[in-house]
Image (spheres, grey):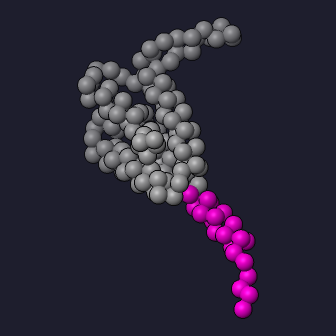
Amino acid sequence: MFLVGIPLLIVPFAIYNMIAFLTPGVTWTDPIAAISMMSGAKWAITPEDALLTFAILLLFIEIFKAARSSSSRGVVDHLLSMLVFIAMLVEFLLVPQAATSTFFLLMMITFVDVIGGFAIAARAARRDVAIEEAVVPADRG
């Protein structure tokens, strides 16, 4: 499974950059669809809504990946997720097209992925140490 180590949150990052740089006239708040609700109201879906929803779904998958990764694969996955977050942070600070609320929220979703991955790895490591201490037989000297 080669793709397991690739951070999935790079996909919304790439989609954002493609839209921001290749279609400069497009705004994130223009409705792309409208859904009639049972209340009679119309819910307007924007590109921002769609991209952030997609990123949150990918975050859900990333958290599962962090919870089941082996130690060596998990370290690589955390490192790559951290690199994606750093790239997003640098772009947010230095590139005018990235200075939007949409990009900031994508960056925060990536930050949650990084911090959540480290927290899950630390918790798993602590559990592994506790299990190993319980399994090691006492010295019979």
Closer to the camera in the image, 112 or 61: 61
Q: Is residue 44 placed above or below 62 in the rendered structure?
A: above
Residue 114, position as x, y percentages in the image? 48, 51
Q: Is 59 covered by the magenta stretch?
A: no
Residue drawn at point x = 34 percent, y = 34 percent: 14
Q: For the N terminus, which image quadrant?
A: top left
Residue 17, position as x, y percentages in the image? 31, 32
Closer to the camera in the image, 135 or 18: 135
Can residue 118 be seen from the camera position used here?
A: no
Q: Splitting the image into 4 quarters, where does residue 119 fall?
A: bottom right
Q: Is residue 78 placed above or below 99 in the rendered structure?
A: below
Residue 66, position as x, y percentages in the image? 54, 49
Residue drawn at point x = 39 percent, y = 50 percent: 80
Single out the residue that lies furthest toward the bottom: 141
Residue 53, position as x, y percentages in the image? 52, 29
Single out the residue that lies furthest toward the front: 141
Q: For the C terminus, which image quadrant?
A: bottom right
Q: Splitting the image into 4 quarters, where does residue 126 fall?
A: bottom right
Q: How many marks?
A: 0
Task: Left or right? Give the position of 43 relative to 105.
Answer: right
Closer to the camera in the image, 112 or 46: 112
Can residue 44 be seen from the camera position used here?
A: yes
Task: Left or right? Give the position of 31 relative to 135.
Answer: left
Main secondary-structure element of the magenta-colored stretch? helix
Q: Is residue 32 placed above or below 130 in the rendered structure?
A: above
Residue drawn at point x = 58 percent, y = 49 percent: 68
Task: Please report the bounds of the magenta region as a residue range.
Answer: 121-141
Q: Is 135 covered by the magenta stretch?
A: yes
Residue drawn at point x = 25 percent, y = 25 percent: 22
